[in-house]
Amino acid sequence: MIAALAAMFVATAASAATPILVHRDPGCGCCEKWAEQVRTQFKRPVTIIDDRSRAAFQQARGVPQQLSSCHTAVVDGLVFEGHVPIADMRRLLAQRPRGVSGLAVSGMPIGSPGMEVPGQRAQPYVVIAFGPSGRRVFARH
């Protein structure tokens, strides 16, 4: 029992020290706004990489082309495409459902994290889970 608790503590401490990598379309400003929210909420360093070949990175990480957005993040081995809300990221990281390799918010919906526009109503959007088991709606906002 003590060994299991110690292992869980070490795994949690290791993930807390691991930087979050965000590959973005070069110069995209909303990506920085989303990354700042992630940095604040996860209390971890976030490294932003301007990636001119992000499509290849997305393909290598299994992001369906139809779910593409302006940035792709990797957090503890899971992939987050676009303006995924932090609460949804945390839920996926905690649950780690079999057959799911990431979450995506396609496009750049107004009102999603990093896409807040003062005076404009948020657009409804869905968060899609994707991976070897296919795609499904993970959350609606």
Image (tube, rainbow, N blue to C red):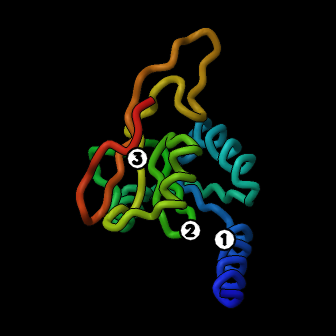
- Name the residue at 40% across, 29% down: 125
Question: Which quadrant holds residue 43?
Answer: bottom right
> N-terminal of the two: label 2 or label 1?
1
Q: How many marks?
A: 3
Left or right, 39 with reference to 107: right
Identify the element where label 3 is drawn: strand
Marks 2/1: CA–CA distance: 7 Å
Q: Give percent across and percent down for residue 35.
A: 65, 46
> N-terminal of the two: label 2 or label 3?
2
**54, above or below 84, in the image:** below
Identify the element where label 1 is drawn: helix
Marks 3/1: CA–CA distance: 21 Å
Looking at the picture, tell me which residue is in the foreground, 101 or 7: 7
Q: Amino acid at mark 2?
A: Asp
- Name the residue at 48% across, 56% down: 92
Residue identifier under label 2: 76
Residue identifier under label 3: 104
Residue identifier under label 1: 15
